[in-house]
Amino acid sequence: MTLRNLLVLAIALTAFTGCKRDTPPSKPANAGYSVQTWVLPAEAGSMAPDLQTASGGRVLLSWINRTQGRRNALQFASYTEATGWQSQPRTVAVGNALLANAGDTPHLLATPDGALWMQWLQTQPDSPSGYDTVLARSKDGGMNWDQITRVNSDGKPAEHGFAALWPNGSNSAGIAWLDGRDQAAMGAGTAAQHAMGAMQLRSNLFTLDLQRGTDAVVDARTCDCCQTAVAMTRKGPLLAWRDRSADEVRDIALARFENNAWTAPKPVHADGWKVESCPVAGPALAASGDSAVVLWYSEAGGTPHLQLARSHDAGDSFLAPVTVEAGAHVLGRSAVGIDARQVWVAWLHEDAHGQTLQLARYPRDLSKRLQTFAVAKLGARGMASGYPKLAVDAGGVWLAWTDVVDGVAHLKGARVAH
């Protein structure tokens, strides 16, 4: 499966709204949480959201605006509960080469020095199926963005995507991505020849001036088109992805970056899910200090299910997973977050009545489910809803997702708080 075979959404134009969400009345710390609508500033037709929290109580939202008859535009906006949306959406990049895809979305990162970083995909003009992972950064909060830099430097007509970003110190960034250069090295022969090359997981570090380090190969054989995820632990960045064995077992693997090198990949849990094609369902990952949680989809045993596992040692080991949901209605598109008291899990399921965005919270030891929410009923079906995104702060969680209204993609948002 290639990235271009994933569903790309069609859109139309709507007006920007800068509405400020009213602050809810305070409640006791042990009270239940409730879902509130969070109006997003993206125009109709927007898709592929990403969410990050940053200093000063800011929530950063990015998305791709894909309007028929116009060039694709990568945009972002900043929000605080005190002031609402702080400006009109700002455009990071625009052009027909900017690849809009429901499965492989751009990512936004704020580093401690105040810089913003953005990663997205650019098609290769001389290749019908090749594309590059590119990176840009802004030193002034997003007003200006420097010349983009290709993260992959091989120059091969291959797929390079499904990236994950993390802060490296106070003023630089790390990035990991799936890299198909070995597949391209097989040449333009038969599909069987192409399949002989393996998709790799690579990483690199970039300075504030976008100077690159030396590529590291984290895993020489991975699933071709599943998302990667990264989270910061006390011991360093923890990276998760879907591995691929020689006999097509595609379980979730992790490695941690410490002492300027990646630890050897190891499985989160031995599911033993053997599947011949890519499920386009990577893991979600969150961490706080030495605590880490990973959420993933599997069909091991013949039943679709979402599993959640925790680590108390920054990813050195994981306890037996907890099943979040199981059954034919479970979709492999989910997000996870962790705060000082609890773990948050968001996922999509689809039945005869349509799709629903679900949210649950657990104590940090995952011993029981504390609360479950049906956040939204979606008009979208299948891949049109993309992948929900979740960001955690001290008050609760922020959610963003893609829905379809009258055949047009729309970004929707929610705040879940006391």
Image (cartoon, helix red, strand yellow):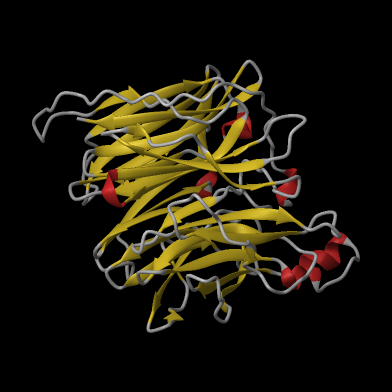
Q: Is residue 286 above or below residue 414?
A: below
Residue at the extreme left: 28
Task: Give the quadrant of residue 217.
Answer: bottom right
Residue 265 on image: x %, y %: 47, 73
Q: Residue at x 90, y 63 (%)?
A: 190
Residue sitting nearer the eye, 184 or 79:
79
Residue 81 on image: x %, y %: 28, 34
Q: Residue at x 72, y 46 (%)?
A: 95
Residue sitting nearer the eye, 407 or 197:
407
Residue 250 in view in this figure: no
Residue sitting nearer the eye, 18 or 121:
18
Q: Residue at x 55, y 48 (%)?
A: 281
Q: Is residue 118 above or below residue 13?
A: below
Q: Residue at x 48, y 50 (%)?
A: 142
Q: Is residue 27 above or below residue 178?
A: above
How many callouts does the rendering have? Answer: 0
Residue 150 in view in this figure: yes
Residue 176 on image: x %, y %: 53, 66
- Image quadrant where one finds the C terminus: top left
Residue 171 on image: x %, y %: 40, 69
Decide if residue 110 is on the left or right side of residue 136: left
